[in-house]
Image (cartoon, rainbow, N blue to C red):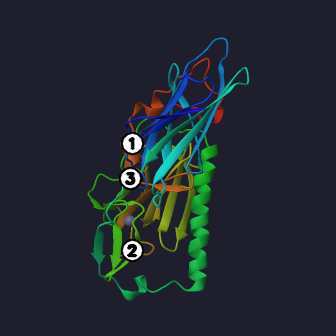
Amino acid sequence: MKICQTTVALCVLVAGTLGAQTTRLSIAPIHPEPGAIVRLTLVALASRADAIASIHGSMAGEPLHFLPSAPGTWHAIGAVPVDATGTLSADAEVRRASGKIESVRARLTLPKLPPPVAQPLAVDSSFTRPLDSATAARVERENARAREVGKHAHDSPLMWTASFLRPRTSAITSEFGSGRLFNGKMTSRHLGVDFRGAVGEPVRAANRGVVALVDNFFLAGNVVYIDHGGGLVTAYFHLSKPLVSVGDTVARGQVIGLVGATGRVTGPHLHWAARYGAITVNPLDLVSLKQNWYGASISLSDSPKRSRTRPVPE
Ligand SMILES: [Zn+2]
């Protein structure tokens, strides 16, 4: 094995025959922010004599789903946890028909960020009071259900072939990661994106998927979670009315609920969240994924046998 340090903040580890760099893994962007979606590219020379049998990978404890995008090239996305610091690596293992295994690693360095910008909110003291133990237990149960939806999405087939949409066309009133200052006290980071909206205005599915969870949560109010497959989930909070049921397949842009002020909020708006497995990510990073990142995936004779993550036409 040999570690190749490049001038950019990624590192490629090539296993197998020293000097014969048949397999490479790279990450973009090289300086992602906490909660970012990163794009991984794996390049492996195809060989008729020794075809690629499978590609498996992981990053930050989550599996990676590599899909062929061109001959000898595979794409996957990975997620940077919001509390990640220092360096993070993605690993992939390419198994050939002969049984030969090549291991590759791409490493990125997280930039040191200034503390989140606080958004002062003067709210009723009921928002800042600690939760009683029964309510805290309820919130934890609801968080666990949301994590479960994320974990299950790794086993769901990829449901989309077009790019992600914003669920509303209105202005963003609170960005991902901005600090929350309640009555002068910093509470937690904002792990979603808020869109302006009046009660009853439409909320659209960011992409094709299967409705995985519809319920009323203590903090998030009426929620809809959509499993898009390949580890990706989007969630829509504080709805006045969900318009879909668990198990429904929804189209990209379909109205799935109406804006509301349910849950622990100061007024009506849409809070939009996203997960890659158990990791909460910035949903706007999904919107900026290139349309062909998955949509252009093609079938190759030496493609890994991953029928569970093969794209389904929209
Ligand atoms: Zn929010």
Task: Residue at 59% x, 76% y: name it.
Answer: 138
Residue 268 visible in the snapshot: no
Give the class, few, some or many, for how many residues have Cα within 10 Å of label 2's Cα (few <14, many ≥20). some
**Whole-number angstrom distance, CA of label 3 to CA of label 2:** 27 Å
Residue 32 visible in the snapshot: yes
- What type is the residue that disc 2 sits on? Val
Q: Quadrant of the N terminus?
A: top right
**Whole-number angstrom distance, CA of label 1 to CA of label 2:** 36 Å
Task: Residue at 49% x, 56% y: name it.
Answer: 81
- What type is the residue that disc 3 sits on? Glu
Tell me the element at label 1.
Answer: loop
Q: Is mark 2 within 8 Å of ligand 1?
A: no
Task: Name which of mark 3 and mark 2 comes first in the sequence.
Answer: 3
Q: Is 15 on the left or on the right of 130, as rendered?
A: right
Among all residues in the image, which is located at the extreme left?
Answer: 171
Task: Residue at 41% x, 45% y: name it.
Answer: 286
Tell me the element at label 3.
Answer: loop
Q: Quadrant of residue 116?
A: bottom left
Task: Name which of mark 1 and mark 2 comes first in the sequence.
Answer: 1
Mark number for residue 134?
Answer: none
**Is 141 or 82 nearer to us in this picture?**
82
Where's residue 305, x and y in %? 66, 28
Reading the image, the residue beneath label 2 is 265
- Residue 314 drawn above or below residue 265: above
Reading the image, the residue beneath label 1 is 30
Task: Indicate which label's residue lies in the foreground, 1 or 2.
Answer: 1
**Whole-number angstrom distance, CA of label 1 to CA of label 3:** 10 Å
Where's residue 227, x and y in %? 55, 49
Q: Is 174 on the left or on the right of 12, as rendered?
A: left
Q: Are marks 1 and 3 in contact (CB under 8 Å)?
A: no
Reading the image, the residue beneath label 3 is 33
